[in-house]
Every structure is written in C-alpha cells, then in structure tokens.
Image (spheres, helix red, strand yellow):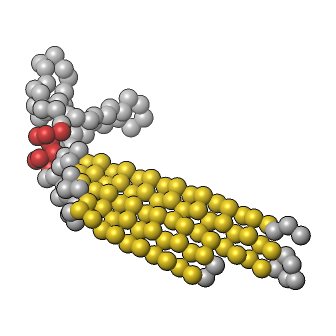
C-alpha cells in the first residue's frame, strides 16, 4: 500500500518603519512540514520540519536568526545574534511632533464665520448640519 503524504509551507513577513526618529524592524518566518504515514502492519508516521526566523533592525544594524529542524523526535535548534542590540526608539513629545510633522497654524481670514475666541484654523473640524445643532470648540 502506498504511503500518505502531507506537506505544508508557511511564510510570514512583517515590516515596521518609524519615520521620526528613523527606525525599522523586519521580522520573517518560514517553515516546511512533511508527514509520511505508512499503513503496513498498523499505522506508522514519520514527520520532519524545518524552519527559520529572522529579525533585522536599524539604523544601528543588527538582528537575530533562529534555525530549527525536527526529524521524527530529534530536534536541532541554532540561534545567532549579530550586530547592534535593538534599542528601539523613544516616542516624540507632542511639541516635537507638532513642530516637525504638522503644518503651521494659520490665522483665520476675516471673511470666515469662526466661533468666538478662535484665532487659528483647526487641523480637524466637524460641523453638524441637522438634528441637535451646537458648535463646540475644544482647546
């Protein structure tokens, strides 16, 4: 009787890129699994798998690689770390974010009907035109 064979293959890739401060992280993973089932004098299964994980980061370039293999019940794993440690990044303060990534505030033109006390354009605004109508400004 011919054996039954099952196989699978899985690949994942994730990217994370921060613009300010510049930082990137890439994570990849690949794995192959194979199972062979023999049905002679009962059922016997032989399985094997091999996989790899890779993490890269920068701009202080570094990474971590893991390789693993399994044949039947024997497992072999290798881990290698290289380059600089992943220090991550510190988030921007609101002032840093506002001054470097948002457009500058502009005075409201005289011909615009703005709520009392408004001196500058808002970055985002919404106006309700029906139902319960009331305009509120958040400072």
Asked whether residue 3 appears in the rendered view, the answer is yes
Q: Quadrant of the N terminus?
A: bottom right
Of residues 44 and 128, the one nearer the viewer is 44
Instruction: Examine the rendered structure and indicate whether residue 103 appears above or below residue 65.
Output: above
The quadrant holding residue 98 is top left
Of residues 110 and 51, the one nearer the viewer is 51
Using residue 52 as the reference point, say whether residue 18 is left or right of it. left
Using residue 102 as the reference point, say whether residue 124 is left or right of it. right
Give me the residue at 87% from left, 83% from top. 41
Using residue 120 as the reference point, say whether residue 56 is left or right of it. right
Instruction: Examine the rendered structure and indicate whether residue 139 appears above or below residue 108.
Output: below
Give me the residue at 57% from left, 81% from top. 74
Q: Quadrant of the C terminus?
A: top left
Asked whether residue 116 appears in the rendered view, the answer is no
In the displayed image of the protein, which residue is found farthest to the top? 111
Residue 75 rendering spot, x and y as whole percentages = 53, 79
Residue 119 rendering spot, x and y as whole percentages = 10, 31
Residue 85 rendering spot, x and y as whole percentages = 22, 65
The quadrant holding residue 138 is top left
Give me the residue at 41% from left, 68% from top. 66
Residue 131 rendering spot, x and y as whole percentages = 42, 35
- Number of labels in the image equals 0
Give me the residue at 12% from left, 27% from top. 106
């Amino acid at each position: 009787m011919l054996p039954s064979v099952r196989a699978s293959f899985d690949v994942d890739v994730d990217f994370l890129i921060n613009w300010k401060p510049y930082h990137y992280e890439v994570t990849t993973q690949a794995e192959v699994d194979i199972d062979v089932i023999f049905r002679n004098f009962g059922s016997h299964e032989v399985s094997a798998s091999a996989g790899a994980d890779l993490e890269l980061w920068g701009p202080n370039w570094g990474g971590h690689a893991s390789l693993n293999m399994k044949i039947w019940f024997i497992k072999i794993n290798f881990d290698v770390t290289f380059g600089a440690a992943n220090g991550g990044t510190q988030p921007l303060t609101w002032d840093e974010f506002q001054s470097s990534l948002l457009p500058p505030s502009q005075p409201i033109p005289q011909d615009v009907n703005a709520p009392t006390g408004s001196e500058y354009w808002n970055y985002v605004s919404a106006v309700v035109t029906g139902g319960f109508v009331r305009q509120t400004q958040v400072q």
